[in-house]
């Protein structure tokens, strides 16, 4: 199955003379752009034009704008720059024709010749060809001129201004990208690629983005690309070419700049020519997730497709794309390269290549179509010489499918029959006529028709194979659609050798996922059929479409109708896709023929809807630049509504036998017509408001008050394409936590002249207002900021805060509606309307510099570990300089060898005003069963202001519960409640946690602590450790018999050598009774000592 | 664990090597194993200081099997007690008459609770908890027979099986007990008895063997009032000599009010020597009982400086 024929077809369209001379046809000697000057009348009109710049208009051929016309001072003859290839290295005939030869390269010459000499040169048999030279300038490429993208931007130095896709992400799912190509670098040499996810290798995965895990492949970031550590390589070259069309900046020269040269780029490399459709969907998700994280609009290009599809937009991949699409999330897809426009100009003929057949029948009707298998040498093995056809029909109908071999043997299957195969010497037939029932996605029936070589003795016979469809019972629309989605005989070139014969047609072949409802699907037309190359001439097309006509390969639609529903328009629009110069991957393997490479050596030609699709992708980027929340439907409406029509676009090529038929726009081949960028931009609301820069600006560190100026929001106002504007006012909403009058002294608005997003020396203060209420508005009126035609200004909203903001309080300025922006035309003072859009400003978070240390007091513990008692922990908190600190909470963590739940029944914190470690007065906070669900608890609501460099002392009392057992220990640690907005500074916030840990406090009172070294005593010796020597330590068995008693114990510890001191003591469980003088403590001791 | 470790480390900072030897009690104390066999599990005996050697009835299985010779038919006894913080013990015995022979089987159980395993952490004095809980259990079973020789001498013998499980170690042993009692009659005005218990056998746990708790008992029981009267009084005294422990004198009294054999309310009092010294029990104990036909309910209270309060409950069916 050829899943991605789109990628293969362009290669098939080119025949290289050195390897396929037989396929080479007659060479068109004269450049198409020069052919109009065969006509003497046009030459006369050109020469009669007052200025050379007026020549194109004089002859009404816009294509002549792309050729270099000059006229010497005082002369009337118009000259044209050309490259001429001769059979002999003698340029004399050029000079004889009035030419001025300036370039000598073997038999190739560069010359400036009179227009009147062109027909003479064409007629001279010593001339191989004459090709026009082109302007090397911004927007000079034919495709850019065809879509008129050059009219909406201006190149200044090496940079583009105007509509260039700034702020928009163009996502490319393809074969990768040559990120080292100058087309994808900024002026300073850094990359324009934000992320490059290579799904084909392993490495650093993207990780989780927006809640979705992308856990395979290798992701390069702009940083790794700039550092030269990104390992991705585009060896296929297709992705680099596609990327260049959509977003390339021309590598500084601007010659072959793409449509959106200032857009940012995210690339997903899904393979080296074929991709899993799963990877495609995942790649789209990845790009959109990245875009969401960056707060940017995004358009994704898919220059790929396949024919094994219902062609009605219900393939899973298509439904997924519909689901992922939305405001600011648009997918553009190539229509496919399976068409066969026969209205070509040669040199060869474009035999109809039909892969679709359809009929509408009544009950008992039959329909036939054929597949002609050519004579071929069977490929070794089985199952590799085949034709495979997918068929769809109304679920209400039942049909019989019959396949007839060239030898007239047949095999049939009725609706619902079990899929089965039939063997014959002429090949195996396999039929599955909706054996599994209705398709779950569209509710129709699908059948599979295959015939192929089952073995070496059963090769697929050459000749005519006939497929007969009999309508057994029509209860539905009576229609079936078949697609031969793949075939191969001998050479292995899929879908190239056995198209449908009689009964087939050339429609409904937009590949999947191009029929996705929300996708914008793109056909291709020709803008160039010859070119100047690094390697000279020698390559031409076997089939050359007319410049301006639908590309010979461009797939026509529409989509298949589901039952009684109408077909949907597909493709949506056409864009240049024939002989397109774009970025050449330096890693292309094998390297392309130099005759395909442009004279700059860094761009190469290719063709296909793979090339037209990124044209539209770039155009959508320009629309999103003006309105980042455009929906796919809005973008499609704008693009198709603005599409250009001409004499070519009124003909469709989806008829039987590949013929053409007059068809008004929109039609099944062109969609709405040819892409027209300026018209589309003009059709977009004329004045748009767009966000610029990060949406959530993280300032980092702290800000110092007073006199702090906190940037919060940056807004880019894009002006009108036609009018100079005066920006007069804006209304911002002040939001956030703690955004009160005591904290905010004002909101200021700056003209961010350097567009840096921060207040700089060149920025201009437009005004300052006081926010009059919490969650209030900052209204700026009476401004007089000029916005030139198609220009833009940057606004910067800032907060001025006084000394009272609380830690972690947030502040945010938002622009909430287009109606909150006011501007008027300079020309007549009339107000202009802006598109509806919102811009969320940066969240500014108060963060101070104060510190708070917590340490143990002089009385760290008191009381014993006795049920019902309240040992206490004394803490001293000290605020650092220079700011006061308000302590709102202390988090207490506990550790114990015993289960904490029930061990501590209550924690209470007191202000220890006397500093003697005594809990008096009312507790500041109390928590009952503090460790019932965890080992830590927060004592909150303290509200204790601690002056800078001063200290406050607290006592935390611990009430012990009944679960307490002898030997249990309890450790408490306490830290201030940092990071949760609990500490308030006079200026702002605490930066680092000061903490004090009461580590491993044994809450036994002195003298009560008694610890053993091991239990069971297996070593024969046990150590009793104690803080103060007990009065006695006794050992009882469980019958109550005291077996040992130790008195006059040494300080600190006593080592009992069990077997040496008590050789007869049985192993078993005993009770150790410790007499402290004030209390009796008991714990079990198990002795398991061998002799 | 961290807490314990750090505390210990702090405690050891100023610690000196243990040099002074500590005083101990008699090092022979407790050399016998099988703690469960040293327990007095019978509530009536516990309430009367532990006297049981000259008593009659099914519970004499646990002190002097010759007392079984007074059994007149099927008799069942069950008792239980709490000891300390999850430790508990219990006993059960069943006896019956088979011609001139009285047969009884019984068992005693001791659950000593569990510890949190603590392993030596460099043996610096502070162990480290492993998170494991280790327990200790003991079980003893006896099968006894008794009969009357001549007109009034009761003679009994028992075969004892003992098993213990302490942490991951276990062991077992078999021993023999025998005794005499005169007269071989219930509620005699004066009864005397003597027995030798748990002779032979030793139990090995974790590679260390300990002998069974060989015990020599001698006792007397005196009933100054007529047995058939509505008031009866029993006075008893025993000497108990346990190998590896100081000998003890124990005694007690039982006062009963009611109709013997149908309804009787009993009060008991006892004392024991060695209390609060070699033994962790209080010197005085008391208890009570209620006789409802063949059913007897018993309770005993015993204080302890080691275990705290201990209560025993018992039920006896039959005579």
Image (cartoon, coloured by chain):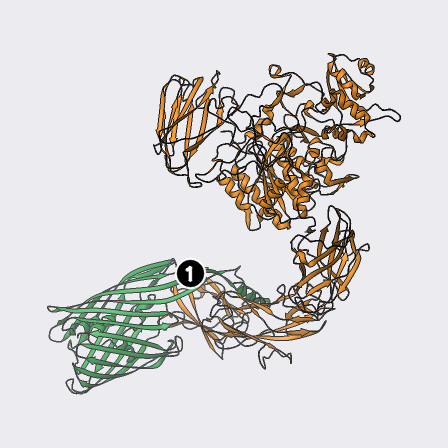
Determine the colour of chain B: green
* Residue A179: quadrant of the picture: top right
Secondary structure of the residue carrying numbered label 1: loop
User: Left or right: where does residue B59 sit relative to residue A686?
Assistant: left
Residue A683 in the image: above or below residue B154: above
Determine crowd level at label 1: few under 14, some 14-19, many 20+ residues with C-alpha closer than 10 A.
many
Q: Position of residue A1075 (x, y in %)?
A: 47, 76
Q: Position of residue A589 (x, y in %)?
A: 63, 27
Q: Residue at x 80, y 31 (%)?
A: A53
Residue A639 vs residue A198, the one in the foreground: A639
User: Left or right: where does residue A250 sit relative to residue A299?
Assistant: right
Residue B279 in the image: above or below residue A515: below
Q: Position of residue A8 (x, y in %)?
A: 57, 27
* Residue A394: quadrant of the picture: top left
Q: Is residue A868 visible?
A: yes
User: Left or right: where does residue B311 sit relative to residue A816?
Assistant: left
- Residue positioned most to the right: A74
Determine the colour of chain A: orange
User: Left or right: where does residue B128 sit relative to residue A815?
Assistant: left
Residue A826 vs residue A907, the one in the foreground: A826
Which residue position holds label 1? A1089
Q: How many marks?
A: 1
* Residue A404: quadrant of the picture: top left
Give the letter of the chain under mark 1.
A
Q: Position of residue A1019 (x, y in %)?
A: 46, 59
Residue A988 vs residue A799, the one in the foreground: A799
Q: Is residue B243 visible?
A: no
**Which quadrant is the C terminus of chain A positioned in?**
bottom left
């Amino acid at each position: 199955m050829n899943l991605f024929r789109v990628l293969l077809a362009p290669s098939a369209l080119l025949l290289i003379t050195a390897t396929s001379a037989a396929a080479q046809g007659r060479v068109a000697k004269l450049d198409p752009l020069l052919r109009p000057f065969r006509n003497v009348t046009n030459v006369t009109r050109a020469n009669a034009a007052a200025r050379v710049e007026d020549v194109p208009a004089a002859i009404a051929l816009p294509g002549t704008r792309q050729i270099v016309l000059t006229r010497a001072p005082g002369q009337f003859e118009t000259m044209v720059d050309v490259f001429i290839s001769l059979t002999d290295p003698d340029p004399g005939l050029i000079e004889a024709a009035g030419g001025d030869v300036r370039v000598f390269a073997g038999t190739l010459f560069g010359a400036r010749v009179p227009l009147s000499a062109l027909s003479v040169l064409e007629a001279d048999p010593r001339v191989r060809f004459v090709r026009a030279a082109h302007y090397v300038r911004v927007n000079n490429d034919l495709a850019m001129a065809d879509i008129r993208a050059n009219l909406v931007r201006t190149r200044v130095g090496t940079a583009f201004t105007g509509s260039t896709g700034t702020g928009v992400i163009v996502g490319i799912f393809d074969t990768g990208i040559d990120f080292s190509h100058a087309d994808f670098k900024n002026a300073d040499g850094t990359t324009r690629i934000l992320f490059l996810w290579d799904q084909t290798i392993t490495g650093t995965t993207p990780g989780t983005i927006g809640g979705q895990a992308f856990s395979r492949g290798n992701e390069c970031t702009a940083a790794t690309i700039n550092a030269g550590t990104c390992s991705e390589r585009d060896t296929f070259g297709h992705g680099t070419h596609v990327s260049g069309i959509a977003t390339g900046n021309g590598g500084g020269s601007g010659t072959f700049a793409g449509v959106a040269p200032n857009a940012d780029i995210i690339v997903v490399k899904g393979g080296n020519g074929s991709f899993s459709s799963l990877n495609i969907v995942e790649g789209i998700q990845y790009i959109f997730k990245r875009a969401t994280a960056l707060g940017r609009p995004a358009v994704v290009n898919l220059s790929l497709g396949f024919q094994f599809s219902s062609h009605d937009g219900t393939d899973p991949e298509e439904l997924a794309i519909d689901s992922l699409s939305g405001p600011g999330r648009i997918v553009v897809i190539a229509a496919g390269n399976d068409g066969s426009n026969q209205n070509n100009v040669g040199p060869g003929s474009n035999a109809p290549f039909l892969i679709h057949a359809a009929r509408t029948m009544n009950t008992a009707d039959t329909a036939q179509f054929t597949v002609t298998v050519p004579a071929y040498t069977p490929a070794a093995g089985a199952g590799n010489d085949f034709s495979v056809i997918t068929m769809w029909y109304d679920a209400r109908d039942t049909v019989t499918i019959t396949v007839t071999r060239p030898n007239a043997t047949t095999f049939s299957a009725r609706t619902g029959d079990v899929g089965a195969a039939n063997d014959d010497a002429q090949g195996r037939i396999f039929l599955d006529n909706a054996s599994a029932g209705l398709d779950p996605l569209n509710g129709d029936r699908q059948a599979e028709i295959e015939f192929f070589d089952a073995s070496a003795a059963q090769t697929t016979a050459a000749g005519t194979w006939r497929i007969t469809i009999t309508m057994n019972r029509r209860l539905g629309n009576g229609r079936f659609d078949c697609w031969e989605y793949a075939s191969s005989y001998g050479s292995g070139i899929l879908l190239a050798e056995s198209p449908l014969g009689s009964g087939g047609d050339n429609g409904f072949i937009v590949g999947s996922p191009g029929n996705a409802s929300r996708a914008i699907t793109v056909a291709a037309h020709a803008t160039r059929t010859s070119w100047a190359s690094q390697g000279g001439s020698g390559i031409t097309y076997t089939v050359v479409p007319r410049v301006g006509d639908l590309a010979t390969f461009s797939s026509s639609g529409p989509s298949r109708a589901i039952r009684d529903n109408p077909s949907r328009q597909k493709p949506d629009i056409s864009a240049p896709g024939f002989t397109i110069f774009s970025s050449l991957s330096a890693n292309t393997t094998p390297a392309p023929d130099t005759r395909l490479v442009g004279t700059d050596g860094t761009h190469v030609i290719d063709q296909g809807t793979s090339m037209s699709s990124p044209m539209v992708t770039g155009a959508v980027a320009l629309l999103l630049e003006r309105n980042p929340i455009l929906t796919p439907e809005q973008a499609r409406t704008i693009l198709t509504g603005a599409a250009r029509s001409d004499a070519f676009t009124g003909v469709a090529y989806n008829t039987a036998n590949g013929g053409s038929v007059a068809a008004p726009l929109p039609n099944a081949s062109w969609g709405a017509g040819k892409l027209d960028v300026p018209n589309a931009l003009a059709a977009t609301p004329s004045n748009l408001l767009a966000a610029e820069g990060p949406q959530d600006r993280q300032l980092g560190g702290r800000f110092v008050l007073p006199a702090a100026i906190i940037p919060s929001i940056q807004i880019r106002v894009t002006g009108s394409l036609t009018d100079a504007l005066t920006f007069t006012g804006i209304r911002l909403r002040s939001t956030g936590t703690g955004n009160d009058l005591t904290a905010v002294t004002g909101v200021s608005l700056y003209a961010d002249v350097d567009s840096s997003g921060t207040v700089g020396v060149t920025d201009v203060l437009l005004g300052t207002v006081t926010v009059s209420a919490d969650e209030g508005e900052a209204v700026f009126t009476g401004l007089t900021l000029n916005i030139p035609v198609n220009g833009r200004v940057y606004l910067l909203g800032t907060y001025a805060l006084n000394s009272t903001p609380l830690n972690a309080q947030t502040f945010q300025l938002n622009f909430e509606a287009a109606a909150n922006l006011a501007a008027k035309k300079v020309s007549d003072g009339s107000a202009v309307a802006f598109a509806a859009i919102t811009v969320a400003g940066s969240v500014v978070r108060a963060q101070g510099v104060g510190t708070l240390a917590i340490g143990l007091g002089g009385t760290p513990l008191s009381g014993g570990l006795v049920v019902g008692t309240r040992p206490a922990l004394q803490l001293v908190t000290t605020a650092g300089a220079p700011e006061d600190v308000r302590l709102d909470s202390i988090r207490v963590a506990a550790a114990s060898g015993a289960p904490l739940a029930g061990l501590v029944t209550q924690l209470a914190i007191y202000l220890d005003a006397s500093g003697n470690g005594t809990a008096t007065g009312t507790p500041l906070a109390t928590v009952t069963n503090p460790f019932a669900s965890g080992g830590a608890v927060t004592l909150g609501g303290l509200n204790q202001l601690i002056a800078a460099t001063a200290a406050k002392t607290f006592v935390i009392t611990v009430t012990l519960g009944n679960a307490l057992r002898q030997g249990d220990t309890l450790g408490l640690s306490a830290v201030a409640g940092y990071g949760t907005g609990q500490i308030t500074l006079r200026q702002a916030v605490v930066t680092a946690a000061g903490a004090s840990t009461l580590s491993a406090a044994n809450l036994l009172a002195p003298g009560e602590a008694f610890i053993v070294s091991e239990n069971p005593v297996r070593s024969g010796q046990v150590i009793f450790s104690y803080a103060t020597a007990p009065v006695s330590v006794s050992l009882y068995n469980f019958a109550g018999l005291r077996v040992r008693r130790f008195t006059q114990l040494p300080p600190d510890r006593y080592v009992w050598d069990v077997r040496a001191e008590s050789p007869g003591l049985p192993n078993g469980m005993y009770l150790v009774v410790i007499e402290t003088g004030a209390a009796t403590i008991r714990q079990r001791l198990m002795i398991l000592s061998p002799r | 664990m961290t807490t314990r470790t750090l505390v210990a480390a702090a405690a050891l900072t100023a610690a000196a090597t243990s040099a002074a030897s500590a005083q101990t009690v008699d090092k022979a104390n407790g050399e016998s194993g099988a703690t469960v066999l040293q327990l007095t599990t019978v509530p009536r005996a516990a309430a009367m200081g532990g006297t049981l050697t000259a008593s009659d009835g099914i519970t004499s299985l646990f002190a002097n099997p010759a007392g079984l010779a007074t059994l007149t038919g099927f008799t069942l006894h069950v008792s239980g007690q709490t000891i300390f913080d999850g430790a508990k013990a219990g006993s059960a015995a069943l006896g019956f008459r088979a011609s001139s022979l009285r047969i009884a089987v019984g068992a005693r159980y001791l659950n000593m609770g569990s510890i949190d395993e603590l392993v030596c952490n460099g043996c610096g004095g502070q162990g480290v908890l492993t998170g494991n809980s280790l327990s200790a259990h003991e079980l003893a079973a006896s099968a006894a027979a008794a009969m009357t020789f001549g007109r009034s001498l009761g003679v009994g013998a028992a075969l004892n099986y003992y098993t213990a499980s302490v942490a991951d170690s276990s062991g077992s042993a078999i021993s023999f007990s025998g005794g005499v009692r005169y007269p071989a009659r219930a509620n005699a005005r004066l009864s005397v008895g003597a027995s030798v218990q748990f002779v032979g056998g030793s139990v090995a746990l974790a590679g260390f063997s300990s002998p069974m708790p060989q015990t020599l008992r001698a006792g007397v029981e005196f009933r100054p009032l007529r047995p058939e009267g509505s008031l009866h009084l029993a006075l008893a005294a025993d000497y108990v000599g346990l190998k590896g422990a100081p000998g003890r004198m124990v005694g007690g009294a039982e006062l009963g009010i009611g109709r013997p054999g149908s309804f009787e309310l009993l009060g008991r009092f006892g004392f024991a020597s060695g209390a609060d010294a070699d033994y962790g029990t209080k010197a005085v104990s008391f208890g009570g009982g209620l006789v409802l036909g063949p059913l007897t309910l018993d309770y005993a209270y015993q204080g302890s400086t080691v275990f705290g309060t201990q209560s025993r409950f018992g039920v006896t069916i039959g005579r």
